[in-house]
Amino acid sequence: MLSFESDYTEGAHERILHRLMETNLEQLSGYGADPYCRSAKEKIREACACPEAEIYFLAGGTQTNAIVIDALSDRYEGVISADTGHINGHEAGAIEFTGHKVLSIKGHEGKLRAADLDQYVKDFRNDQNHDHMVFPGMVYISHPTEYGTLYTQKELAAISEVCRKYSLPLYLDGARLGYGLMSRAADVTLPDIARYCDAFYIGGTKVGALCGEAVVFTRKAPKHFMTIVKQRGALLAKGRLLGIQFDTLFTDDLYFSISRRAIDMAELLKKGFQEKGYPFYLESPTNQQFIILENRRMERLREQVSFGFWEKYDENHTVVRFATSWATREEDIECLMKLLEND
């Protein structure tokens, strides 16, 4: 069975596994107070060109989004997101469970537009009944988006400008950040993100780690953030497990090199589908490719290949997602192309 279902179906990069084994019997302080967590934080600050950044390690993306949004918001506030944003559609209500409503704005190929954001906040403030409404307290974006699209530096700067105009923290979900940064279409760098965002996270779970996300507060973290993390049951006693992984990922540019490999494989996959005449739902320059399949062909292909359902296109067609990862093999793509030839 070939798998292009997601980018976290494999375990971890062998260099991470090797370092975990190599350090296994070392006796280290808990809760992130170990030398590997400290080293990883310094390497991330350097990569972000943000020496004042405060960094925390959490285990997963949903957990990270819920805790960061809760910590950055007053209890009467919600978070603005594109209607297709991950927190609006695929977090099972995790954000609302913390008491903060997701305030959705129509997205454009997965992205928020600065002008729409500005108009939304302006309309809210001009509404004479706004004291009876959920206040917009922060802004959420992801890079790449749910549709594999990327913000340009100009778009990111414009959104950041609106956020600062209204004193709204800008938070970027970086679950697949490596794949966004290493896309050949990208003009946004890690230092750019640190410059324009108040908080973001560097995803490890989908980019070579067994688990783990590195939360970066570019100016100052919310007061007693570590205590908030512990209240939510998200503080690992063996914080070394996350520190060692990120220390390895940010040694010798491993995070970036394995992300580039996923992009290389996605481009090979994309070329194969194009040559065989398959239509694309939209143009994605990252590791997620969205193909429109005729339903009967989709069911036949499912017997030998796993891929993600995305949305119904019409009565006879479905949008599906093929995702590559840091571990995707060229021979798997070759096998997929042969299956398409015989279909």
Image (cartoon, grey):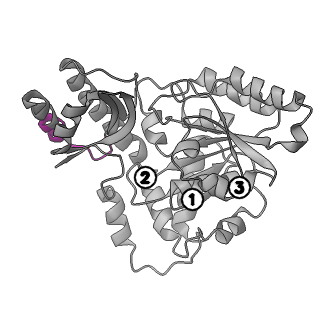
Mark pair 3, 1: CA separation: 11 Å
Q: Quadrant of the C terminus?
A: top left
Per the image, is 195 magenta? no
Residue for point 70% across, 23% down: 116
Q: Nearer the viewer, mark 2 or mark 1?
A: 1
Question: Which quarter of the figure has residue 331?
Answer: top left
Q: Amino acid at mark 2?
A: Leu
Residues 212 and 116: in front is 116
x, y percent for residue 289? 34, 31
Q: Amino acid at mark 1?
A: Gln
- Residue 156 shown left or right of residue 261 in the figure: right
Question: Which quarter of the figure has residue 78?
Answer: top right
Magenta stretch: give its range.
324-335
Residues 62 and 300: in front is 300
x, y percent for residue 132? 87, 43
Label disc, if present, on residue 63 of the rendered structure: 1
Residue assigned mark 2 = 249
Label disc, if present, on residue 70 of the rendered structure: 3
x, y percent for residue 63? 57, 59
Mark pair 2, 3: CA separation: 28 Å
Label disc, if present, on residue 178 of the rendered structure: none
Q: Farthest residue in the front direction?
A: 315
Chain-order first, disc 2 or disc 3: 3
Question: Which quarter of the figure has residue 301?
Answer: top left
Chain-order first, disc 3 or disc 1: 1
- Residue 48 shown left or right of residue 319 in the figure: right
Chain-order first, disc 2 or disc 1: 1
Residue for point 55% across, 49% down: 44
Residue for point 51% across, 74% down: 238
- Up-down relation of residue 84 to residue 209 (above or below): above
Per the image, is 333 magenta? yes
